[in-house]
Amino acid sequence: MSRILLIEDDEAMARGLVYNFRASGYEIAVESDGAAGLKQARVGGYDLVLLDVMLPKRSGFEVLKKLRSDGNETPVILLTARGEEMDRIAGLKLGADDYVTKPFSLGELLARVEARLRRSSKVAAEVEVDFVALRISRGSHSSRITPTEAELLRYLIDRAGQAVPREQMLKELWGVTHAMETRTLDNHILRLRKKLERDPAAPRILQTIPRVGYMLAPGTISLRERDGKTNDPGVS
């Protein structure tokens, strides 16, 4: 799961972004001023920083300049109400990777974040799946999966980042609509989690979306090809 740091002093905007990024499978932390944001960015081990320009204590430009002077190459996307060309140029010259002007489309921001993370060498899948051998590998740990578990996992990989309702999964996977069968689905999910997750009690890869169903976090799984290499099916 990719870790994002949001440095934004607008509480309403921060709440909205946190909600939507978590719903999209990201782990996200928030700081509301430049000084605290800089400190957190230095120690937090984040995969990407969303950085407002107009911040108390330290401006976003100051935070960015300091991070780059420290040698911190974490990707940074600037968020700002300023739309002037000189401000955009200044941010990019200081080392920003992208620049989004408020008000912005949430869908566009999510797409820009996803694209930047794909290009970042810091992003690595946590689990490798071999659907031919029916095997999941997580570090040095390897587990067999059943054909049913493989079918379920493939379905979720194809919809990574989407919250999929239980009823939809039952119908599209197995043609079942009876509500009693949701317990069977939940049991399959629990067994998969034991093979996918470092801590099945606090799942990061195969997440429960309350009152909806399940979601596979994007960027967490890669697929093994027959030559022993891994490919990128759009989720790693």
Image: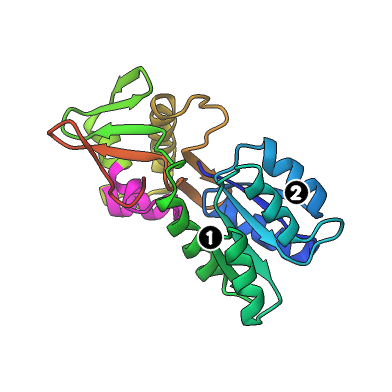
Above or below for 213 versus 13: above
* Residue drawn where x is 41% and y is 52% of the image: 119
Left or right relative to 119: residue 37? right
Q: Main secondary structure of the magenta part?
A: helix
Colour option used: rainbow
Task: Look at 42% across and 40% down and name the residue there.
Answer: 220
Q: Nearer the viewer, residue 228 or 127?
A: 228
| Few, some or many residues within 10 Å of mark 1 (<14, 14–19, 20+) | some
User: Magenta residues, as a range?
Assistant: 154-173
Q: Position of residue 185 (x, y in %)?
A: 39, 39
Give the CA separation, mark 1 to mark 2: 17 Å
From this viewpoint, which residue is outermost toward the left?
227
Q: Which residue is mark 1?
A: 97
List x then y, in percent, for residue 178: 38, 49
Q: For the residues carrying marks 1 and 2, which lies nearer the camera in this image?
A: 1
- Verify whether residue 123 appears in magenta: no
Residue 58 point in image, percent of width and height = 82, 56
User: Residue flagged by tag 2: what amino acid is it?
Assistant: Gly
Quarter holding residue 195: top left
What mark, if any, has residue 37 been given in the picture?
2
Amino acid type at mark 1: Asp
Dot 2 crowding, Cα within 10 Å, few <14, some 14–19, many 20+: many
Q: Secondary structure at mark 1?
A: loop
